[in-house]
Each structure stands twice: as C-alpha cells, then as structure tokens.
Image (spheres, grey):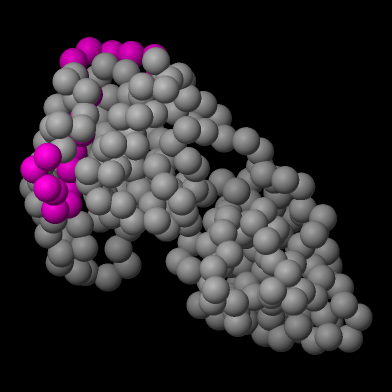
Amino acid sequence: MGEPSPAPGLIDLIIRGLEQVGTVTVPVTGVSMLPTLQHDDRVVLEAVAVETIKPQDVVAFRADGRLVLHRVHAVRADHLITAGDSQRLYDPPVPLADVVAVAPRVPAREKPSRWPFQGGDGPVDVWLVEPTSGTEEEIVPPWWRLRRRTREGVCVSAEVLTEIRAAAERAPTVGVSEKAVFAARDVLGSATLPAGTQVLVGCSFGHLHEPMRGHLVPSELADVLVRVGEPEQRLDAAETLRRLARLVASAS
C-alpha cells in the first residue's frame, strides 16, 4: 500500500475489520514509502477520528478506487497534504472523507540528505517561467542571471522545455515548487546555489496522463526539488527569489 493497493474490494474489507475490532494488519506493496517501509512489510492500521490526525502521521486513504499508505505533511480544514517517504512532490490533496485509517507504528521519516554540490562554472541561471514584475533583478545577487520565459497552458512550450532540459542536463539543477516535500533550508544548507547552478522557478513539475496545451517539466530533470514557503503556499516570482537570496546570505 505504499503505492496503491490493487483490489478496490480490499478497502471495504479493511473498513469492516476496523469497525468490528478496531485494528487490521495489511501487507505493504510498492516502493513509495521506501526506505521506511519495504515491499511485503506488514503494517497495523487503526481506526481514526480525522480531527486527531497531525503532521507526520501515516494514514491509509482512498485514491482512484485504491488504498494508499502515505505520510501526512500538513492538515487543512478539509484535506490533508501527503506524500510517500520516497517521493519529492506531494500527492494531490486528500479529502478528509477519504481517510480510512492511521498506521501509528510506522517509524519516523528519515531526514532529507543535504545537497552535495559545492560549485561549478558560470553564473547561477534562474529560469523564471511565470508572470514577473520586472523588479526581480533588484532582489537577486549580481551573479544570478535571470532567464524569463512565458508560460504556455499547464506550464511551458515544447521549445522552452527543450531549453530547460538542455540546461538541466549539463549543470546541477534545483527545482522550486510549493508542492516540493522538502524545505530549501533543509536540503540546500551551506551549499546553497553555488556557481553554475540552474534554478527552475514557476514550473509545474510532473507528467501528464492526457494531452493538454503546454508541457510539464519532468521532475527528474531537477537534482533536488525544494519549496521556500509552507506546503502548497504559492508565492510570486519576486517573493520566491527574495527568500532564496536570503537563504544564500544566511548560508554564506
């Protein structure tokens, strides 16, 4: 269940067991909860009152007719923000009504690894793929070079994606997204944005399951994915760059 469990009828059986005895033991399938949970591990699920769920709990919830076991990163009024421990981006929001159980005995998630990159050649290139105010140059250090690109549809045109892909393949790349699991301060540390880094700001990361106008940026193009605000907190380009620049100043 680290990844979705294949049998929709399993959810009904689990719910019935929770109603009757309060706990159910289930096998883990998939790899999305690595390294915390391995494929074929067994996990004890317990009935839960949704108002008691808190960040770092591991919950089982319905998703597309399947059962998923992922960790909670934030609790909102009507939904949870979750992700598997091996994932770099959050799941789609999980309605509280879709939560089936909690797994209280799952160990805590490991701390994120620090980015090992120490430096390279050339300026820091910041790709701004969103509406900008035109004042961003006043915010960033002089060795950051801003590359402004317009959005198309869900993200970027095929031409811009080709540009970004080429830049990411030749230099260490940081993707900035409000959907990133890890905060920039926890991953970048003292190695924040050294010379040669490519930074992607305003991109939508992932893969489309059906044709749409524009192209998402594949998340694997970025060596690390980080956020500079709270989970799912959408910031404009200026504020994103301001927070990145502040992080650089505090790390230098």
- The count of marks equals 0
Q: Residue furthest right?
A: 21
Considering only vertical position in the picture, is 251 above or below 150?
Answer: above
Q: Is residue 171 magenta?
A: no
Query: Residue 47, can we see it?
Result: yes
Quadrant in the picture for residue 175: top left
Residue 145: image x %, image y %? Answer: 14, 27
**Would you say residue 115 is visible in this rendering?**
no
Q: Which quadrant is home to the N terminus?
A: bottom right
Where in the figure is residue 83, as x and y percent of width and height?
55, 56
Estimate the x, y position of residue 24 in percent, counting from the top left: 84, 72
Residue sitting at 40 percent across and 42 percent down? Answer: 228
Tell me if 12 is positioned left or right of 230 in this view. Answer: right
Judge whether residue 118 is colored magenta: yes
Q: What x and y, as percent, mark residue 152?
A: 12, 59
- Say left or right for 136 vs 222: left
Q: Is residue 215 above or below residue 186?
A: below
